[in-house]
Amino acid sequence: MSDVTVTPAAPAPSSSRLQVRPELEGAQPIVASDGRPLLQFKSPRVSQPPVHLADLTLAERQDRLKELGHPGFRAKQLSTHYFSHYTTDPAVMSDLPKAGREELVRAMFPPLLTEVKRLTTDNGDTIKFLWRLFDGALVESVLMRYPGRVTLCVSSQAGCGMNCPFCATGQAGLTRNMSTAEIVDQVVAANRALAEDALGGLRTDGGHDADRVTNIVFMGMGEPLANYKRVMGALHRFIDDSPEGLGMSARNITVSTVGLVPAIDKLAAEAIPVTFALSLHAPDDELRDELIPVNTRWKVDEALDAAYNYYRTTGRRVSIEYALIKDMNDHAWRADLLAKKLNQRGRGWVHVNPIPLNPTPGSIWTASEKSVSTEFINRLRAAGIPTTLRDTRGKEIDGACGQLAAGE
Ligand code: SF4
């Protein structure tokens, strides 16, 4: 994350500022029968991949092994190979009897992700993976090294049903929900790539010392809370101790949503202290109805109430994501309105992350002027809202996560 310097006395908003409205450029919107943007909450009825070890709890793995005629204790051995050594190669599993080993491994680890493409930034700190799933659907994940941590941005659905006009994924609609294991396997594959030095090996300068994925953000393809059950399964695999799971810290996992209010309430009640992020992008319903179509279902205030309830229930400070789009949502009055709405609910419960877009000449989906971004941030800070301009690592390889793929 990079901080923006605070300069006091933000100028008054200019009343002559343009209001650019969200619209698709060169594509037809997907609309429902009532003419409004189509929202797909249910996955189309398509088959899921074969069951994989990472779909199951440890007890379920033991049951499955017994069904396959193997002793239950093999579950721990196989889990260790997968979650600690990131391998599904029978050749290295010398603790399993040779006879029947290949069949056992094939049954418990059906291949889920096939690497189609791997793009690496020039300095080697960021990799975007494009994966083909068992049915040909394509998803992506982005691996980013920062001082002292390694973050993976994961996909949770093939496509997305939320139809946000600034998002390439949303324009393609929802293909299907990803399985728990397909979500988890993105992290295991990234850990495997790290172990093979894909990010250039460990670096001790400046604290570059994480040797596996330490942070996960659900900001790739899909709306994670629209695939609730399978995402919950993946969260358990991420945080459960080895050998049941990866043993990661829940705090280092960010679940991000455009505002599916009932699912936010459900997540709060799970009492898993993951970091929660609301992709708000506008504080007023008039604009947000167009910018984030799900806002026609759950309004700004309902989404903010649910976010505040998340904080109250879990004690975890909530993040508000806000992509700054030139003349669309970056007006000073919107910064003031956002601050007012956040402060109305309390102090110290929320953090705002403005996200700079790429400058895209000729597109309405382009970056705010620097002075405008600075004013927006200063107004929030002046109102007592902690605000940090977010890093947009990966943009140079078109690696912006689904939620940030504005105008692509
Ligand atoms: S921005 Fe996120 S929620 Fe909206 S269509 Fe894209 S992936 Fe879906």
Image (spheres, helix red, strand yellow):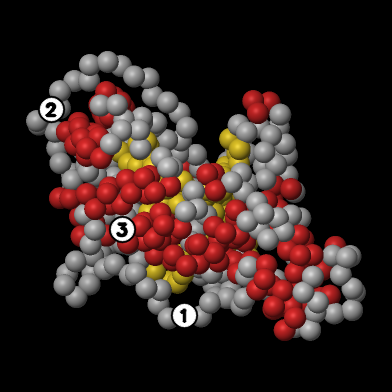
**Of the residues tagged 1 and 2, which is closer to the observer?**
1
165 vs 111, left or right, is left
Name the foreground residue: 407 vs 257.
257
Instruction: State whether residue 205 appears in this view.
Output: yes
47 vs 371, left or right, is right
Residue at numbered disc 1: 46
Q: Residues within 10 Å of mark 3 (few under 14, many from 20)?
A: many
**Figure check: 38 above or below 70:** above
Residue at numbered disc 3: 261
Instruction: State whether residue 165 appears in this view.
Output: no
Name the foreground residue: 242 vs 120.
242
Residue at mark 3 to residue at mark 2: CA–CA distance: 34 Å
238 vs 320, left or right, is right
Which badge, 3 or 2, is on the more N-terminal residue? 2
Examine the image and state in which quarter residue 370 appears. top left
Q: Position of residue 185 (x, y in %)?
A: 62, 61
Which secondary structure, mark 2? loop
| Residue plotted at (49% across, 48% down) | 273
Q: How many marks?
A: 3
Q: Position of residue 286 (x, y in %)?
A: 15, 50
Name the foreground residue: 250 vs 182.
250
Q: Which mark is residue 14?
A: 2
| Residue plotted at (22% across, 16% down) | 9
Examine the image and state in which quarter residue 113 appears. bottom right
311 vs 287, left or right, is right
Instruction: Look at label 2 and name its amino acid.
Output: Ser
**Of the residues tagged 1 and 3, which is closer to the observer?**
3
Which badge, 1 or 3, is on the more N-terminal residue? 1
